[in-house]
Image (spheres, grey):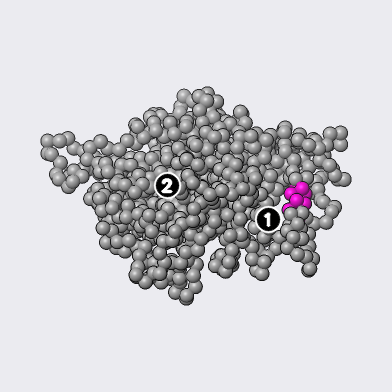
Amino acid sequence: MIHSPLAQFETRPIPLVVAETIETQIREHNIYLHLIRKANGEEEPIRLGTGRNAVVFLATDLSILHERAHFWAVKFLRDDPDDHAAYAAAARFFMEAQSLQDKSIGINSLVSFLGWGAIARDLNRRGPVNSVKEFWWEAFFDVITGVEFYKNDGPDYHNIKNRFSLQGPFYCLELCYGTMENLLERSERWIDLPVYRYYTSSAAALKTNADALRDPLEVFVKRYLHHPSTEKELTLRDLSRMSGYDILNAFKTDHVAITTTVNGEPINPNESSVTHDPNLIRNHAVLKLFIKIVESLHFLHQKQEAHRDLKPGNIFFWHSLGLPLSVDVKLADLGYVTNVNVIEGGMTLRSGSEQAPGSPFYRGPEQADLPIEVRISVDGQDQRRVIGKGSKISNIQPNDWLYVADLFDEESSYYLEPDDDEDTGQREQRAILSNQRRNEYRDRRFYRITQAEVNTQTGVFELVLEKPIEGEHSYDLQAQISKNTGFHTDIYSLGAILYDLVSGGRNPEHFYTYCLKVFTDQFGVNTDLIPDDIDEVMEIISPERGNKQELQNRFRLARLVMTTSKVDDLIEEILRQSYISASELEIKRKIRDYRFRTFDVVNTLLTDKRGYPIPREIVRIIVRCMLRDKKQSFCQSLTGWSAFTDATNRQTIVKEIEAAVNELLDSIFRLPERHFPNKLGDDLLFRLRALAFDTNEPVGEPDNGASVQAESASPYRPEAEPEPTIVDAVNGKRTASTEWQGDE
């Protein structure tokens, strides 16, 4: 019997009313936050994580922490003193919640959604929230009629709101077991993540698996891993405190001679010798994790929707409680999800001075680049046509956006100043009017581009807009061009994630910028010199070993070695003698390509952090994801950026990526068939990261200096849970539920 850590924690439950909309009805759920006492005597909920725009607390459907309870994560919207930032965070927060509510029912590849609600307003509160934005979020609840959000009211709720600077709204998600960011970046033991401190069953599952797989883990570590810097042997204790990147970079690079079976017995002397390649095993683990991410994304693309913010922090792990545990990948943070109709309509980005959706390191080039600053003049005969010039113009495409900053509203500001004696109703009406003025003013400055002609040499461009530009001024207007985003963004992100994994933590944006961007028209080079297919790109950055040329005229080279002091001249002559039958233009290209791929930055980025070359076959998949509009690229904009299917096979692009990865797993990167610890074969990287700890060591201490009490000291016991009610979303009628029995 494994000791339950839950008995250590004295908590005080407070209920939250959570509403879930199902078609035309609303179900109300009662869940509980658990206040835990800190060393200074203050109480706050058990916190799972904190970010700039949200804080996540632990909740259960029972009023005590008990392994029979269903555990949830409650995400609260945080405030920001900057009203503009607070409004943007609120808009995305509700987009994410609505998107999850609409999509996650019965879908294993997305984090499931229970419902949403809000902490009631505290009219006596002062501070950044005590402004018009306190009312903004209420508009998002209009579709959920009949729900009494003000049930979540009282001193405990207001204290939480003030302590963490919350706006009030929250939504409730299933509790997962960490993210890919936790797996790769963090170095603490996996069992010390907050979820395992309070969820007995999950901690027990980890401990059971850690005990059962201890022998295979020890064999694996001894054979295939060593300390990255000293090359000394590692122990399981060492491994338990290594991040996922550390583990990937601890794999040996030389083949390993196998002298014993997995059980430690000597191999039969009559058996042929066996060697294993740790690099193959490492890359197998990378591809198996990557394909789980691809499979999860496939659900969204199959529904004709793009995620547009794929990154390790939005990739969650859920594992079974069985032996051996198996891991599923679930996607979260759907605030930037959009559908094919929106993409075709060019509505995926109207950001003005803001950047596109997406996150650093994993965002596509159209997301990473700031809007392009341009000066334009409106055609006097047709106000839908504009002409301009920009020295940094590379490509403008239909469905991109023109934001005309020099169109000013002559009316008063969209923010209405409050009166000293206004009541709550007047204040709320002022907030609504301010929001409407704000949106109308912004809309008047955005113009969707329907046609574009660009001369990349001169920088002159001519655009046709969806609507005419109306205003007193038409000459030399300051404007910005923002790029459209869609399914191609997700495919780029997959390539970035795969590069991140296989390189052991190198920067994917650097890889694109230094190794691939030169092969795009955005780089501004002569388009005649840019390869038009992936095979040619690969031959430049990573030539096939079988394509080595025979060296000719060795005597001439010997004389050159004796007579020249210029290394560049010698290298050029060696290359000329290797391609003696090629034309002069071809030889110059070969020399250029050689110098490019041997450039120190490029050469480094084509190796992992161990200094070992990234396999050419995996690099090819990365390049096919990151580069567009080339033969063999996964994405072709010729059919529009809304295209999420392969033009030839008519299957989703992610299925094509999945097939390419499976082909490698079934051939080059298959695990050894003899004397390999097969119990670690599935979910290998997760198991190495999560199961290497000593099960006799205690789970980490509670956060925030929480006091530890004996179970007998806790006065809190399960209460009779109130029966859920169902509210008709159309007429607001409330009826007792006789069929629904909770979230089994």
Q: Quadrant of residue 54?
A: bottom right
Direction from residue 453 to residue 268 in the image, left or right: left
Is any atom of residue 175 visible in this view?
yes
Q: Which circle, 1 or 2, is nearer the viewer?
A: 2
- The picture quadrant where one finds residue 473 is top right
Relative depth, front residue between 145 and 419: 145
Characterize the local packing of mark 2: few (<14), some (14-19) or many (20 or more) Cα atoms within 10 angstroms: few
Give the residue at x 53% y 49%.
736
Which residue is under mark 2? 744
Of residues 739 and 718, which is closer to you in this image?
739
Q: Secondary structure at mark 1?
A: helix
Residue appearing at x 27%, y 37% in the figure: 672
The residue to which callout 1 is attached is 136
Q: CA distance from mark 1 to mark 2?
A: 35 Å
Name the N-terminal-most of marks 1 and 2: 1
Q: Which residues are magenta?
A: 434-442
